[in-house]
Image (spheres, helix red, strand yellow):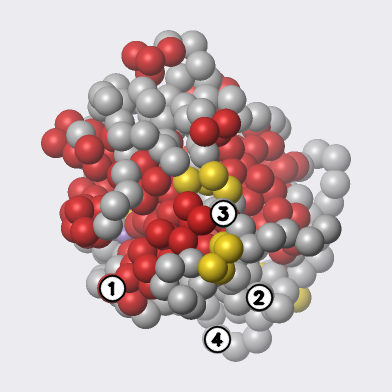
Amino acid sequence: AITRRVACPDGVHTATNAACCALFPIVDDIQTNLFDGGECGEETHESLRLTFHDAIGFSLSKGAAGGGGADGSMITFADIETNFHANNGIDEIVGEQAPFIAKHNITAGDFIQLAGAVGLSNCPGAPQLEFLFGRPAATAPAPDLTVPEPFDTITDILARFADTGFSPAEVVALLASHTVAAADHVDPSIPGTPFDSTPFTFDTQVFVEVQLRGTLFPGDGPNQGEVQSPLHGEIRLQSDHDLARDSRTACFWQANVNQQAHMASSFKAAMAKLAVLGQDTSTMVDCSEVIPVPPPFTGTATIPAGLSQNDIEQACATAPFPALQVAPGPQTSVAPVPPS
Ligand code: HEM
Ligand SMILES: [Ca+2]
Ligand SMILES: [Mn+2]
């Protein structure tokens, strides 16, 4: 089918819906001035985390009292929500994004999801996320305790997600986010410590490395929500560890290993749901075309150098863990993600 495109007033872009034209200058601005020229670095990681912490302020069982979902309340009511324990550190990216919202004609809810999708496009291997445009301004803060903590039980985590409409398979799909991620506050003595050995690449390494036997704490652990990791310089969340081993989620976890296309497409679908939680999509415009196409990832998953397939703690009862090559070289040690 031929889609009619309209010329944008900037004389440069065309769009399938004229409403999307307003987004191109915002995308250019944040690529240059928020994401340091298009990096999959700290601000990209923090912006992706923020899409989740804003959106998950939602509840099917509690209605409006459970929060407005992906409505920008994390920024509009930052004085309240950034103080919640699970949002520790989110104030940094809230502070960095706020001036862009003030400068451009866009709501905080739209901006948070736009920035998350644009930032992720800088990570090789990532899917091009959907972006629907048209969230109204938030009217109230989300209540406390909507954001899962790394020390929560899998039963509690799955229940919290179920109350926002996500299945266990979708929860695991969303955790692909932790392939481009680091922790600043789980062990404050080692800020920027990644969850996998490739925090600038949206690959399947996190699903491999969380399945390895934990042998060390990278800093002064154990800290609350932290369990042992397999690599120097890498930190492991108790929640990721348990999701990889619990019978309700282990096979979904393992199914991502070295399955780049499956990981990317299931993450994209789950993110499309997350990004519009609590929103009326019938009044929104599909502006996915403004999201840049991410560079591909063409490598394969590996067992980190110095370890072997025997270090995998197989947990899925119905399928063997995929046989992977061991990366060559000396024992892997992971460098921190530099602060911006
Ligand atoms: C069971 C659910 C989850 C738990 C318990 C959890 C917990 C955490 C924790 C404790 C951190 C470290 C924060 C810090 O110390 O700086 C973190 C980082 C991160 N999380 Fe999650 N998370 C969950 C799900 C998600 C989801 C669904 C997304 C996005 C779709 C996400 C995206 C991220 C990202 C990108 C970071 C890295 C931020 C950075 O590098 O600065 N997380 N998460
Ligand atoms: Ca990675
Ligand atoms: Mn960080």
Callout 4: SS: loop
Mark 2 crowd level (few <14, some 14–19, many ≥20, 10 Å Cα): some
Q: Nearer the viewer, mark 2 or mark 1?
A: 1
Mark 3–mark 1 distance (CA, rounded to whole Å): 26 Å
Mark 4–mark 1 distance (CA, rounded to whole Å): 37 Å
Q: Earlier in the sequence, mark 2 or mark 1?
A: 1
Where is 245 relative to 2, above or below?
above
Q: Position of residue 289 (x, y in %)?
A: 58, 61
For label 3, the residue is 17
Q: Earlier in the sequence, mark 3 or mark 2?
A: 3
Q: Earlier in the sequence, mark 4 or mark 1?
A: 1
Specify the amino acid type for callout 1.
Asn
Mark 4–mark 3 distance (CA, rounded to whole Å): 53 Å
Callout 1: SS: helix
Q: Position of residue 27 (x, y in %)?
A: 41, 66
For label 4, the residue is 330
Q: Quadrant of residue 134?
A: top left
Specify the amino acid type for callout 4.
Pro
